[in-house]
Image: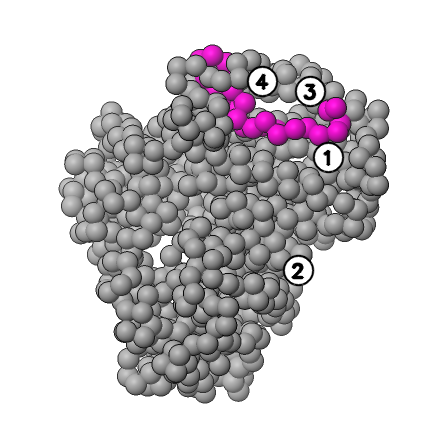
Amino acid sequence: MRRQRLEKLRSGMKDQGMEALVLAGTSPVQYATGARIASADSSHGIYQRTVAVVLAEDDQPHLFCTEPACAPAELGPDHVHPPLYLESPMGVEALGRWLKEHVSPGSRLGVDDKTVAMHEHLGEWCDVEWTEANYVLGPAKVTKTPDEVECIRRAQRINELAMYDVQAALRPGMRQSDLSAIFLGRIFELGAWGNCIDPIWQVMPTSKAEGPYTTNGELAFPLVTTDRLLAEGDVIWCDTGISYAGYASDFGRTWVVSEDPRPSAAQRQLCRRWLEVVDATLSVTRAGASAHELAVAATEANGGAKPWLDHFYLVHGVGTDSAEMPLIGTDLGEDFDRGLVLAPGMVMVLEPVVWEDGVGGYRAEDIVVVTEDGYQMLSDYPYSPYA
Amino acid sequence: MPEAGGAGRSNLGTMALEEGGRVDFARLRAARLGRCVSAMAEEGLDALVLGREANARYVSGARRLWNAGTRPFGPGCVVVADGGQVHLLSTWDDGVPRELPRQNLFGLSWNPANYARALAQIPGLAQARTIGVDGMSDSFSRMLAGIAPQARLVDGLGMLHRVRAAKLDDEVAAIATAVRLAEAALSHVVASLRPGMTEAQLQGAFERRMAELGSTVPGAEGAFCRTAAATGSPELNEGDLVAMSPSVLYAGYEGGLARTYPCPGRHPEDGVTPTRRQLHARWRRLWDALLSACRPGAKAAALLDAYRSTGEPLPRHPVAWGLGLGMEPPLVGANLPPDAGADQALVPGMVLSVGGSVSDGEEAYVARDTVLVSEDGPVLLSRHSHGPLAA
């Protein structure tokens, strides 16, 4: 898997005329090198960066890290270096000098994220032309190899197994943070590499007016977990994600807080509608379909109203980022969606939302991988207590 | 060393409510923003455009969703000097302090054109001549050139680091609370240490307890590991020496510590050998040297000198780093350039994570503490026991 990813990057670099990729972000570094980077607050990621440089003419990436043990076994000692500090002139000088030794003057280099110090000082040490690493990373990441799909499947399985335990424990009188406690304890026992997102257990209102103010008049979601007490009959939208081998999972379901959760007929109808929207979307999902076709199918199945949150999407991709391309139904607009064509190996998280003001909503997320003639489901978790 | 700092610097713990040992968040937010706006005036900044979560939180006080790892720079928060208004990327007002008016919120967008339109509507930004930023990208500098054509983009990070370095009393109280949570969850892990557990299970046990205590986000994972070279088995054996360096975020503030305990067998004394006691004693000497270097006015490099003076080799990992809204400068260590922090002077109110590791070639004793730098000397904010090896 690591070899194939690197081949994709190097062939993209050749097409783009890039001599090197300089990667400073957690997800791109994991993608390019397979380095195991512990989940941490972004501040740790910034001040204790793991950095990668991919050279077009080198069949191994260079990794700069504090902990050499984070490097995959095949990386030779000449490719694992002490860390680079990209927040100060002297730290940037170390990167600049290294680049000067390894790339030719005037060459084109891709970079994923520039610190202010890089922006201001890198030019003093190496005379190169900078461009966006995304021109190479984007096309490489958007379709997954079978091994990558398997990593996402495993990440999702770990996530789901932990959620069985949380759902079984869910009772009135628990706090939102108690659900996080069960979840966080369980994912490590099940083999997760780390937790990616503060787990969400949002208590949903029955009408938009009862919820928090929003800039777009839409439902506020996702809201941050606190130690709020959960009460009998609360409807909660769960959203959790972990990482396995650098790949993210994405779990979404709607639950009812109760000793004996029995959604009303109207609530169950929302879930039925949600399943219809997903079925309609998947009925047009296959390699060659445009993203717009999926959005149209979903909207038609919802009686003509867009069944997703205005500030999000009907579909997002998942990989080494928990939300990446393909994005479908965003404010990038219809033309963007028309131009986005599904390809085999794209992994899509479908996350429609069905809402009926006064009753409430149903939201869940399911992950599929696009195949030549359709799709394959990667999620495997029941819609209980709704369906 | 004083147990409690003077001059209002209380170190009485989270239960000392009569002394005001709690955080007044409204006061904290007002003071932080006030500091930032005065620093902007001193530096001649008309606006600040911030992408980093810790900076955005410092000026806005908003609780936004936590995600692991770094993201590429994108404007998530704007401070306009004239009027001191904060504008925040948030589609809703949940988690947003009440003093931040609704019209100052701009919603999440995937389309750079919509993003640019939202930013362009921020009063005062278009007229700005000098804008401080905490990150950069070519697309962002193009976008900002369209919104604020006269503006020069300058480094805003140095100013923010200076503003954030010396903690307000409320910030110290928040960090102390985070430390208490980390210590309580660590005690739980220590009590459940037994052969057969894996390092991952220790991390799980820690995070479960941490969330039961009310915080759902650690500073960093991967905090539990055996100090001897890998044995090939993922499971702990009786007597394995386990280094534990957990941290917890409380209202964004980080507190943490590190301790090393032997995995107990049938008897509590299992794993407590003279060699290991000796290791702890060496660490204690190192610690005394490090702590004496945590004095205001001293360069942070004094911590490295202190480390070297004990004869212990410098570790790969940093010896010290700043704590506040997560990790922050100064960072000091063998693998860090001097301008990451070593050549910076320590000031009263700085909070540092300080520690080290001593090894006998086979295994190591690792420990660190959260320390407040004060006029009256260093104040320990973490006080968890060092366990049987220190007894």
Q: Position of residue B163 (x, y in %)?
A: 35, 28
Q: Position of residue B300 (x, y in %)?
A: 51, 20
- Residue A214: name its quadrant: bottom left
Amino acid type assigned to the residue bearing label 1 in the image: Tyr
Where does label 3 land, which residue? B284
Q: For the residues marked 1 and 3, what is the alpha-carbon distance in whole angstroms?
A: 15 Å
Q: In what element is the residue under mark 4?
A: helix
Where does label 4 land, which residue? B291
Q: For the residues marked 2 and 3, what is the alpha-carbon distance in whole angstroms?
A: 37 Å
Judged left or right of residue A268, residue A93 is right
Residue displayed at 73% across by 20% down:
B282
Asked if badges 1 and 3 are on one and the same chain, I answer: yes
In the picture, which quadrant includes the C terminus of chain B?
top right
**Closer to the camera in the image, B352 or A202:** A202
**Closer to the camera in the image, B302 or B99:** B99
Q: In what element is the residue under mark 2?
A: loop
Q: Is residue A183 above or below residue B245?
A: below
Asked whether residue B375 is drawn in magenta, I would say: yes
Where does label 1 land, which residue? B261
- Residue A144: name its quadrant: bottom right
Q: Are marks 4 and 1 in contact (CB under 8 Å)?
A: no
Label 3 packing within 10 angstroms: few (<14), some (14-19), many (20+): some
**Closer to the camera in the image, A124 or B312:** B312
Where does label 2 land, which residue? A190
Judged left or right of residue B365, residue B372 is left
Q: For the residues marked 1 and 2, what is the alpha-carbon distance in whole angstroms?
A: 24 Å
Magenta residues (range): B368-391
Amino acid type assigned to the residue bearing label 3 in the image: Arg
Q: Are marks 2 and 3 in contact (CB under 8 Å)?
A: no
Q: Is residue A356 above or below residue B343?
A: below
Query: N-terminal of the two: label 1 or label 3?
Result: 1
Frontmost of labels 4 and 1 is 1
